[in-house]
Image (cartoon, rainbow, N blue to C red):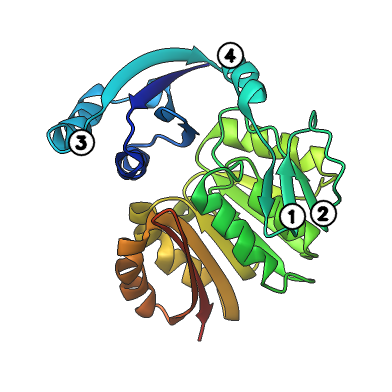
Amino acid sequence: MSFIEVYISTEDSSISDILMAELGEIDFDTFEEVESGLKAYIAAESFDQKALDEIISRYKGSFDFTVEINSVEKENWNKKWEENYDPIEVDDRCIVKASFHNIEKKYPIEIIITPKMSFGTGHHATTWQMLKLQLDINFLNKKVLDVGCGTGVLAIMANKLGAKSIEATDIDEWCIENSKENYALNGINDVKIQKGEIAGLQFEDNFDIIIANINKNVLLKEIPYYSNLLVEKGFLLLSGFYEKDISDIKKCADKYNLILDKIVTKDNWAAVVFSKS
């Protein structure tokens, strides 16, 4: 399996954030923020050159950046990631690290991740924010659903916080394989994981907590399903959108008995907690 790498070279971090959001809308699902800009990845069979060109043309006259497109094999990605991956600390309460990291400091929660080509290492602001929100919610004996699981890091956090049961979904087989591998690395072997969009999946029961770190358009489409699957007084954690998009997310959630409880922001990205009334 091969991937397309789009390397956006720029000294302006604001355009990196903007293009990251835009590329997420056309199915780029892995991002690497580097000193010289941004690298975005997508499975080769999902790559749409025309859609990319349309995005680039909208911003080319307003920002100074260059674009380079490369083909990357998944084996090369793993080696490259291992050479550049640094541990991520969340509020001194959690560390997300790779198996090859030797960290002397002890944290209340330690998560081991090998992300391969999946999104969600803790480096991106949205994943970091979701982990932070999870730390402040009571997961003990709760039934949890992780929508768009990516690396599985959010489900792993739920498990370490005491969740009774966890289910997960993703539309990408590679993400599902990666999540299973990371569950095993963290001693978790009972996560039920399904492939597909949530509208086409079946669940035996409702959930106390639903987690979805995807993108704005997908969230707006799927919020009705999240609400239907959430128990009364249950929590919905969402991220994958900008601060400026919070009002749109809230307006949609209002229609489905979801009350906005908390907002966190980082690097212009937002994450929110809703409760079901």
Q: Which mark is first along the chain, 1 or 2?
A: 1
Q: Look at the image and tell me whether residue 202 can be seen.
A: no
Q: Which mark is first along the chain, 1 or 4?
A: 4
Q: Which mark is first along the chain, 3 or 4?
A: 3
Q: Is residue 144 above or below residue 107?
A: below
Q: Nearer the viewer, mark 4 or mark 1?
A: 1
| Cα–Cα span, label 2 and label 1 | 6 Å
Q: Position of residue 45 (x, y in %)?
A: 39, 21
Q: Secondary structure at mark 1?
A: strand
Residue identified by numbered label 3: 63
Q: Are marks 2 and 1 in contact (CB under 8 Å)?
A: yes
| Cα–Cα span, label 4 and label 1 | 29 Å
Residue identified by numbered label 2: 107
Residue identified by numbered label 1: 94
| Cα–Cα span, label 3 and label 2 | 41 Å
Q: Which mark is first along the chain, 3 or 1?
A: 3
Who is closer to the viewer here, 102 or 150?
A: 102
What numbered label is drawn on residue 76? 4
Q: Are marks 2 and 4 in contact (CB under 8 Å)?
A: no
Residue type of the residue flagged with mark 4: Asn
